[in-house]
Image: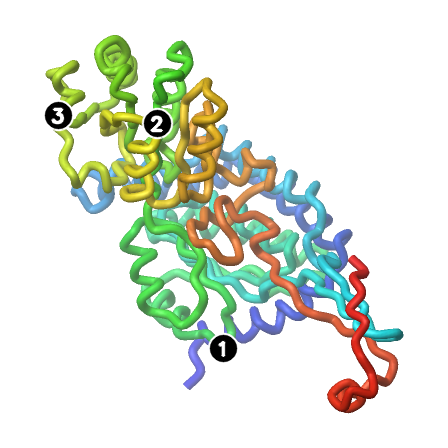
Amino acid sequence: MTTNLEIMAQNAKLASYTLASLSTTIKDEVLSLVADKIEENKLLILKENARDLEEAKKLLESGEITQSVYNRLKLDENKMRDMIQGIRDVKKLEDPVNKKLWAMGLDTGMDLYRVSCPIGVIGVIFEARPDVIPQISALAIKSGNAVLLKGGKEAYYTNVILAKIIKEALEQTGQFPKDAINLLFTRDDVAQMLTMDKYIDLIIPRGGNALVKYVKENTKIPVMGHADGICHIYIDESADLNTAASICVDAKVQYPSACNAVETILVHESLLENYLPQLVLELEKAQVKVKGCERCKEYVPHIELATNEDWACEYGDKIVSIKAVKDLFDAIAHINVYGSGHTDCILSEDKQSIDVFMNLVDSAGVFANASTRFADGFRYGLGAEVGISTSKTHARGPVGLEGLVIYKYKLYGSGQTVAPYADGEKTFIHQRII
């Protein structure tokens, strides 16, 4: 028996074929309409988000959700502004579809091209992050992909109104397939979606470790994403100490529940006596709970002792662990053992140390002298992102438009057959065109 979700997935697959052939002009027109309609309906969106927050507050008080989940759920003027601007920024980006990436002349009158094309149908599973819907919808529109979106129940009302506004914009053009953007609602939908490898080409989970692990263990569909965001800042002995504390505070406090917030600060042992107390003071002024290794406690006795579990913990809150390291290589070793491959940073004025750190730290984002919070598709100039990938295939780091296209080979011949080449009568010239 064919279910409603299976019909939705089938229709999305059919829509994906039309999407792959749409012109840049049509896609950009739709993006303008989506941004305008969200701006026009801003008060309505905030009203629906307030309904979600009212329900979520009860869940928070009962301990069913965490403070970080509640924080991600909330939309405000700044998030709305960034949401709308993100869509308009995607419109400005170069169309990633039908770009000639590579070309080879195989023989006279026979040319082979590698050309970018949409992935097809993408299933996105996310938790209490209502701003994900416009972000991913915008990227899907520009990259020519159809999407199935399953948001957390905590953001039900916000998700519904955003999806409704976006679909109205698609229908207004008259040229965009109506099944390009689809919203799912139940936990059963997730389980069923993960079985639909016939129709869905990629799954992107955006949420905690448990969600990503569940998705990876229950589908044959390729999965792109990250489980943890355990980010580090290493303060080198040559660091500019006037800016080091402000960077650490920003990386922890600016949005503590974000996956690119710093969780562990590594401090060169030469800085423990004269600098560590100042760093702890600045963090505590920002209401951050500080944990530290045994050596750190020698210089700042009042902080809580960190355990091995802390080094592998994504707090998602105003908590940070600090560890003393003997040198640059000690810091790098710690990061490569306990890090999640997300984003890690060195604070240093020594170019050689920076270069070594950049080359040896095995993460999707490696920074020098800047907050880890810059690891974001919008801030990278990608317009928006579908998520952060810590894998080493296809796409890595903040995944924007380029991460949502793959490629196909197009061979333009003039009547050639393989037999003469197999028999040695003809040979390939293999001359690069692009």
Between 408 and 81, the residue placed more toward the observer is: 408
Q: In what quadrant of the picture does the N terminus appear?
A: bottom left
Query: Is residue 214 something that shows in the picture?
Result: yes
| Residue 205 in which image quadrant | bottom left
Q: Amino acid at mark 2?
A: Tyr
Task: For label 1, count other residues whose C-alpha is less than 10 Å away and answer few (under 14), some (14-19) or many (20+).
Answer: few
Identify the residue under disc 3.
294
The structure residue drawn at horizontal position 16% and vertical position 14%, both measured from the top left corner, is 299
Residue matched to label 1: 198
Q: CA distance from mark 3 to mark 2?
A: 18 Å
Of callouts 1 and 2, the N-terminal one: 1
Residue 431: x and y, percent? 80, 65
Q: Considering the numbered disc 3 on the image, is that residue within a helix, a strand or a loop?
A: helix
Pointer 3 or 1: first along the chain: 1
Q: Give the residue at x 45% y 57%.
A: 224
The picture places residue 358, in percent across and down from the top left corner, at: 46, 35
Which residue is depicted at the point 61% across and 62% down?
406
Identify residue for label 2: 234
Vertical side of 423 occupied by 71: above or below: above
- Disc 1 residue type? Lys
Pick the quarter of the image with the C terminus.
Answer: bottom right
* Vertical relation: 166 (above or below) 313: below
At which x and y percent is residue 190? 37, 65
Local secondary structure at mark 1: loop
